[in-house]
Image (cartoon, grey):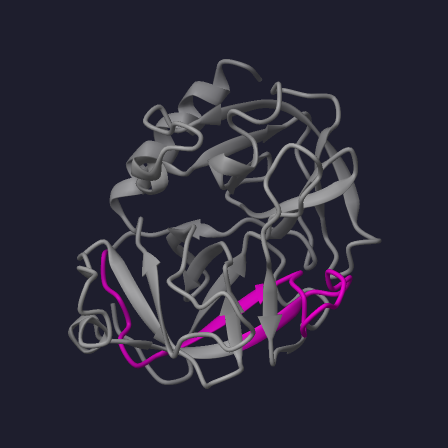
Amino acid sequence: MTMNLTLYLVIILILDVNYGIQALRIRRLIGGQPAIESEFPYQVSVRYYNLHICSGALISDRHVLSAAHCICGLIDEPSEELSVHTGSINLKEGEKHAVKDVICHPDYVYGSEKSWTADLVVIMLAKEICISSSQSPIALAMHDDVPIGQQAIISGWGRVHPFSWLSRDLQKLSVPIIDNNVCQTYYKNTTILNSQICTFERKGIGACKVKYIIFYENILLLLHFETYAKLNWEPLQEKILCKILYKFQIIINYYLKLFILYI
C-alpha cells in the first residue's frame, strides 16, 4: 500500500472506569486536545449501568469491536445494562443502543496474563445504527504493514492531567510510530515481538496505562491492551503496542458470520 506524510494512524483508547467489579486503574491522556465533532465516527462508548467502561470501534452497522477484559468474565452477558453509545464526542450525548449478544475470543481467559493476544470481543447491537457523518463503521486491515515514521492519533476519554476526572469530551494526541529495533534498545529485559509496535512520546505528554484500538488510512490495524509505562504522570518515551492486523480479520469475520445466525 502506498503511504505518504498526510496519512495518519488513529488510535482509540479503550479506557476502563472502575465500577465495582474491576480493580482501580489509572487512565489518562496527557497533553492532548479536544477532538472535533465527527472526527472519529467509528469510535463508540461501551457502557455498563450507563457508565463508560471501554471504548470500541464500529466494524459494521451492527457490530462493535472492543476489549474482552471489559466484558468477558465480568458481566453476565448479554446484560440489559450493557449498552453502546455512538455519534458524539461528548459522553453526555450520542445515541444509546441496546446489546443483543457478545462473542468473546475463544482463547481469552479473564485475569490470565497469557490472554492479552486474545483480548477481543465483538458486540452485536439489537438493531442496525443509522449511518451518518457522525457514526459509521471502520474497514478491517488487509495487510500487515506498519507505517514506521508516520504519525498516530491517540483518542479517548481519559484524564487530561493528574487528579482530574475522566474527560467528558473526546481527547486526541499525535505520536509517531518508531522501529521495533530502535524500541528494543530501551527495553533490555523485555523482548519486543513482531506482534508489537512502538510509539514515541515527549516527557510528560502521552497516554499511560491505557487501552488502544489503532487505525491507519481509516482501516483497523491493531488492538492493544497494555503499555509499558511508569506509574506516575511522566510517560516513558517509548510505548509498546500489540498488533492484530490482518490475521485477526479472519477471526472477526468468523464472528460476524456467527452473528448472522442471531439476526
Residue 50's place in the image compared with 237, above or below, is above
Residue at (41% x, 54% y) in the render: 226
Residue 163 location (% of width, % of height):
72, 68
Residue at (24% x, 76% y) in the render: 186
**Relative to 53, is 142 on the left or the right?**
left
What's the magenta region? 144-173
Instruction: Out of 87 and 104, give the one closest to the viewer.
Output: 104
Instruction: Out of 121 and 26, give the one closest to the viewer.
Output: 26
Residue 196's place in the image compared with 6, above or below, is above
Residue 47's place in the image compared with 143, above or below, is above
Label the magenta part by its dominant secondary structure.
loop
On whether residue 133 falls in the magenta region, the answer is no
**Relative to 166, is 8 on the left or the right?**
left
Residue at (60% x, 81% y) in the render: 31
Q: How many marks on residues? A: 0
- The answer to which image quadrant residue 150 occupies is bottom left
Instruction: Out of 249 and 80, give the one closest to the viewer.
Output: 80
- The quadrant of the rendering that contains the N terminus is bottom left
Residue 90 location (% of width, % of height):
78, 60
Residue 203 location (% of width, % of height):
47, 85
- The quadrant of the rendering that contains the C terminus is top right
- The residue lying furthest to the right in this view is 92
On whether residue 147 falls in the magenta region, the answer is yes
- The answer to which image quadrant residue 23 occupies is top right
Residue 158 location (% of width, % of height):
65, 62
